[in-house]
Every structure is written in structure tokens, then in C-alpha cells.
Amino acid sequence: MNTRGLRSQLKDSVPVTGMGPQVGAYGVQDTLRSGFSSVKNELLPSHALELSEKNFQLNQDKINFSNLRNIQGLHAPLKLQMEYRAARQIQRLPFLQSSHLALDTLKGNDESISFEDILNDPAQSEMMGEPHVMVEYKLGMM
Amino acid sequence: RKMATLSVCQPQLGGFSFENCKRNAVLEAEVTKLGCNIPSARKTGTTICGVVFKDGIVLGADTRATEGMIVADKNCSKIHYISPNIYCCGAGTAADTEMTTQIISSNLELHSLSTSRLPRVATANRMLKQMLFRYQGHIGAALVLGGVDCNGPHLYSIYPHGSTDKLPYVTMGSGSLAAMAVFEDRYKQDMEEEDAKRLVRDAIAAGIFNDLGSGSNIDLCVITKGRVDYLRPHDMANKKGVRTGNYKYKQGTTGVLTKSVIKLDLEVVEETVQTMDTS
């Protein structure tokens, strides 16, 4: 849910994570994982909404947590984030579709429908990842 | 190969995908160089309006959908259902108004199941304005939202960028100025239902006859506490005319001078039977 009035949160300002070059280890372009780079692709988003949509959920969470911290104290967002972290681990292997049921219930997404549920459903995606590569990446072996 | 490795790092998210935007921009530039136009979205260049009367709300809309200069739909329905006591008229891009009202209707239904109360118009208003502001006006939906809830009748107008107004009478769409002229002249507080219906009908008719983007019939929706009258069509302002003359000639008008019959010799070359699997 949106909150109104961000003046009280100016000190907890939200940085926008941009489209910068995908850096891997050693701070160089990670060609193996993200393909060849192009200056135009990285500097300019292809649509005015691309950046804001990519970070929408993150920004909403940050706003809500900082609001909660200001109202109820530090313990409230800490407890919630601990629960989110625990619920996020209840999922299948990386290349399989997980329902994220616990996480959705905690966040309240089970009681609302938005374009994320209707358009571009990841379960209907035509592309599949490489199972070995994805598991190795998740376990940090790669 | 490249796509497979891409999906390793970023988890797949639903929602809008901006993959083709750069390609579309390039295509548009190429097509404009050749002098053609890319296809345009279907809009509802429209007149929609709403008025608060003594016991509730009257919403009105015309029924023409345009695609550039062509009428795409002569009888489209612009008054959308949101909840049993709330209805919403939509102007702007037809797909956007349709999808937006359906999403908000679903969300409101879930919300009312969760609170086990009849939904309020203010809730629908807030959901709509937050969604439209999130997309910064790229979703071209201008809406007139009206309904009756536990606090009485409410009427809101919602603009594509997310601003809303709560007023006793509102108009939206390309014919909004014509309709507003009628409202400004004849609106009174606490009208009777028949007066309110006549006022809305006249306002939409003004839009239909004075604006090219609006036309065809007039739909009305009367919402009162416990009752909804969806009158479609309420008034057929632009009936297609009936041809008065007939260009068909009676049999025997032309005299027959001679008649000769030539039989064509057709022989059967091949005969095959193909059985259908009707299981």
C-alpha cells in the first residue's frame, strides 16, 4: 500500500539502482553472464518507466519499512525483515517455478492483483535456464 | 546461449516488459522515413458524464469507439462494472480503460471479501489513482467513477496521470466541454431521478451531436441504495436511416426475344471417399 508524505523520510532517501555496466569479479564487464555491452543500452533506459518499474517493489518496501521504523521503533522492521528472509528460503531449486506462497501471504500479495500477475507470467516463459549453471550460481560456486 | 546465461542472474519477474521499446523506436523512425504511419491504438473519443441526484448517481456515456478517423465500434459499452454498487465510465485508450477497471474490480472484490463489507467508492478511487500515478500517465485512462455506499452517493473524476476530483457533476472525454455546458446550465442540487436522467441524456446528446469523436447511442446507469439500473441503450440518438427507394426491377419488365439452352457434357473422372473421424 502506498504511503503519503515523504518529507519525514528524506534522511532515509532511496537510491535508484541504475542500469550500470554489469560488473562481475575484478570490476570488469562480465561478458560470460550478461553478454556483450553497448554504451547506449546501459546509459539510457529504453522506456521512461523501465527504471521505476524495475525498482518499484524495492522502493515501496523501503518506504514502508522506514515509516514503520519511525512510528514503532527499530524492532518492528527488523522482525518483519527476519520473517521475510525466512519465508524467502522456502522455495524450490532455482530453475523450477516456486509459488512463494509464504512470502506472498506475509507481504499481502495474496489479496491483490496487478499487472505482475497478468502480464509476462514467469511460469509461461519460453526460455529455460541451464539447471547446472543456475544451481552453481546460487550456491556461489561459480 | 546468451539468453540462457542471462536468466541465471536475474529472477524472472512478471509485469510489463520493455524489451521491444528500442526496436519499436527504430521501426517507427524507418517507417516515417518511408512516409507511412504505424497503426494507432483504438481510442474511445468520447463523452462520459455523471451527476449526483437526491437518492444516488446517474452515469452516462455515448457508444462510439474510434481508430484515428474511422469508427471502430458503433456500439461499444463504456460503463464498466466495478462492484455491485459502483460503476465506472472510461474514456481514452479503450484497452487501458477496460483492463484498469477489470483489475480494480478484482482488487475491490478481494478487499471486500477480506473486510466482509460492501466496498466504498473512496476505496476504488484511491486504488485507481495510485495505479495510474505509478505508470505516470502512460496508461491513458480517464475515468468517471460513481457509486452509492454506506456514506451516501459519491462521484469522482480520475485523470490519466492520477489526479482526482470529487464533485457533484463531472464530464470527461473529447465531448466533455459540450456536456459540461449542459450541466452548468441546468444542474440543481437534489434533483429527482427522472430529471437527473433527462439532464444526463441531454448532456451526452450535446456531446454526440457537437463532437466528432462521440456518437451512436446513449447508455445510462442509475445507481441508488440497493438498486442499479443499467439502461443500454437508453436512447438511440443516431439511428441508421432506412432506404426509401428500391432499385430492383419486377420480373417480366424486360421482354424475352429468344431463348437457347446449351447442355455442357461433364464426365466423372475420379471418385474418392474420405472418411471423417467422428469419435
Image (spheres, rainbow, N blue to C red):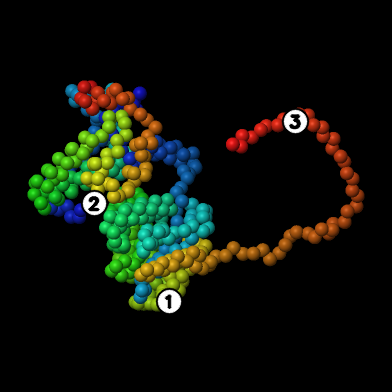
Q: Position of residue B72 (x, y in %)?
A: 51, 53
Say what amino acid the circle numbered 1 marks: Asp
Residue A69 shows in this picture: yes
Which residue does the numbered mark 1 point to in the structure image?
B195
Which chain's residue wears label 2?
A: A
Which residue does the numbered mark 3 point to in the structure image?
B271
Numbered mark located on residue A1 in the image: 2
Left/right placement of residue B92 relative to residue B126 reads right
Q: Position of residue A2 (x, y in %)?
A: 23, 52
Tag 2's secondary structure? loop
Which chain's residue wears label 3?
A: B
Crowd rating for badge 2 (residues with CA inside 10 Å; few <14, some 14–19, many 20+): few
Front-most of A68 and B31? A68
B271 vs B184: above or below: above
Label 3 to label 2, Cα distance in Å? 72 Å
Label 2 to label 1, Cα distance in Å? 40 Å
Tag 3's secondary structure? loop
- Labels 3 and 2 within one chain: no
Earlier in the chain: of badge 1 and badge 3, it is 1
Say what amino acid the circle numbered 2 marks: Met
Say what amino acid the circle numbered 3 marks: Glu
